[in-house]
Image: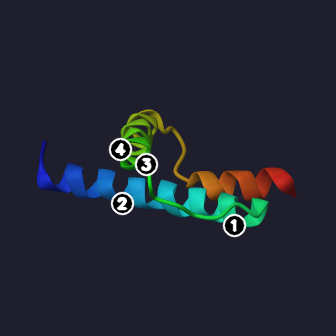
Amino acid sequence: MSATTMEALEKKVNVLEAELLTIKRSSGAETERKDLNAWDQLETIGAEISKLWKSEKPSWQLISESRR
């Protein structure tokens, strides 16, 4: 895998983590990173989702627009 591809995937995972944090904060849940295996699984799932993503817009923007 090229460095550019890895950087793009890392960026998308970071976006997913930020979205998860926002969702947790808005629902009143505390953020914990005790289960590192769960975070590894989240990163794997995020990478798979990013491969299949068909929109130019990030997911948070799509959600925001759907709420309007």
Q: Nearer the viewer, residue 15 or 23?
A: 23
User: Label 3, label 2: how many angstroms apart (C-alpha)?
Assistant: 21 Å
Which residue lies under the disc numbered 4?
A: 40
User: Label 2, label 1: how many angstroms apart (C-alpha)?
Assistant: 21 Å
- Give the residue type that dot 4 points to: Asp
Which residue lies under the disc numbered 2?
A: 11
Q: Secondary structure at mark 1?
A: helix
Label 2–label 4 contact, CB within 8 A: no
Label 3–label 4 contact, CB within 8 A: no
Marks 3 and 1, the one that precedes in the sequence: 1
Classify residue 42 by image quadrant: top left
Classify residue 68 by image quadrant: bottom right
- Give the residue type that dot 1 points to: Arg
Q: Secondary structure at mark 3?
A: loop
Marks 3 and 2, the one that precedes in the sequence: 2
Q: Residue furthest left?
A: 2
Marks 4 and 1, the one that precedes in the sequence: 1
